Image (tube, grey):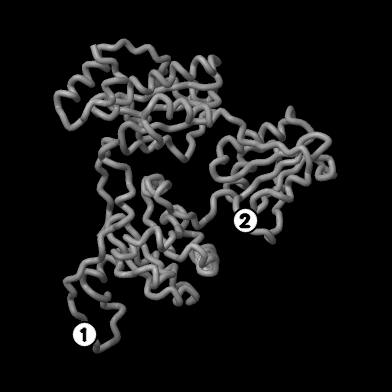
Amino acid sequence: MLSPRDAMFLPLSDPACVLVLLAAWACTPAKGDILNLESGNIDDILGNTDVALVNFYADWCRFSQMLHPIFEEASNIIKEEYPDRNKVVFARVDCDQHSDIAQRYRISKYPTLKLFRNGMMMKREYRGQRSVTAIADYIRQQKSDPIRTVGDLEELKTIDRSKRTIIGFFETMESDNYRTFEKVSNILHDDCVFIAAVGEVSKPERFSGDNVIYRPLGESAPDMVYLGSLTNFDLAFAWTQDKCVPLVREITFENGEELTEEGLPFLILFHMKDDMESLEKFQREVARQLISEKGTINFLHADCDKFRHPLLHIQKTPADCPVIAIDSFRHMYVFSDYKDLAIPGKLKQFVLDLHSGKLHREFHHGPDPTDVAPGQQTQDLASSPPESSFQKLAPSEYRYTILKRDRDEL
């Protein structure tokens, strides 16, 4: 009998091989210590576990079936290293049986691997290789200490200013203040570097007690001091998240899938990598005009050289950069002119025209009648905006069973 692990390497294009694969999984007893989550136990189990990796699956999904034995074997390996169930848990949710849980965590594809810390779902799901080694290494990484401690305050003068950094000064690691700092760092370590000075080393910075500062990007940017309660997790987390996760994020081929899955349209500045002036202007205008639209659209910037194909889609090249465009996941729309960014309200109106459907209508039918001067005739244009380019970065149908959800758009 072929082992489930060996069966993973059979070609999926051959139906006979798929049958062998399913038989190998079905005929092998489940040895992994996988917890089955349901409405009655999910909050208790996840809330009392430092790190939980949850497999959201459907039995009829072949990708879910392929993952089961791999997930179980990774669980066995990690259990030997972390036998305390309060430290690490591997769990699964049958989304057909528990659709309420699937809806609660907005599961849109099978299988989805989500990481939880003390009951809180992490924004970034596991998207790495589906192998025993990769999954086990991922959990080991999650269990590593995200805080780097310094032995001398002089070390803080040499930290990398190209990365956002949170620095804490504490009397002891046994304090509630430090434990809150540690909890926040576990959640946001992908977005910021966390550094701590503890004990006698930190004394010169603790003249008024324990404190936390944010060191922004740039050599000359001044530090910002956290003024809230150091033991209030919600306040500390909100402040740190605001500092570590920028309003305008960079889109790359590595995070493109993650960003598309947030389900929000993209407002993108295409700029040359070394053109920081355009980026700063864009960031300033987004903060000034569009802060109220946060949660309805993602504000992004992209390297013109790396994203030549989307530029070509809108009949632009890197020589035309900086360029601003919207990708609605159906179509792409180009902002009139980058120089118009300085016109008060112009960028906001561009986003509002997306939400109202005006951009879509105008591409198909020409200017809205209300935008035409009296006596000027309008012409119905049989044109169509370019198709979405960034939608191609969405999860691959060769790795997931994608649940079809229609997007509302005029």
The residue at which mark 2 appears reads as 217
In percent of width and height, residue 98 lies at 33, 26
In percent of width and height, residue 199 lies at 80, 34
Vertical order, 64 against 347 (above or below): above
Looking at the figure, which quarter contains the C terminus?
bottom left
In percent of width and height, residue 125 lies at 43, 37
Q: Residue at x 48, y 77 (%)?
A: 343
Point out the frontmost of discs 2 and 1: 2
Q: Nearer the viewer, residue 220 or 268?
A: 220
The secondary element bearing badge 1 is classed as: loop
Q: Residue at x 35, y 67 (%)?
A: 353
Q: Amino acid at mark 1?
A: Gln
Which numbered dot is residue 365?
none
Report whether residue 12 is seen: yes
Do residues under tags 2 and 1 come within 8 Å of each other at their CB atoms? no
In percent of width and height, residue 225 lies at 72, 50
Q: Residue at x 33, y 20 (%)?
A: 69
The crowding category of the residue bearing disc 1, from other C-alpha atoms within 10 Å (few below 14, some 14 to 19, many at least 20), is few
Looking at the figure, which quarter contains the N terminus?
top left
Q: Residue at x 50, y 57 (%)?
A: 248
Q: Nearer the viewer, residue 204 or 364?
A: 204
Q: Nearer the viewer, residue 263 or 315?
A: 315
Report whether residue 355 is seen: no
Which numbered dot is residue 377?
1
Q: Amino acid at mark 2?
A: Leu
Q: Nearer the viewer, residue 318 or 197?
A: 318
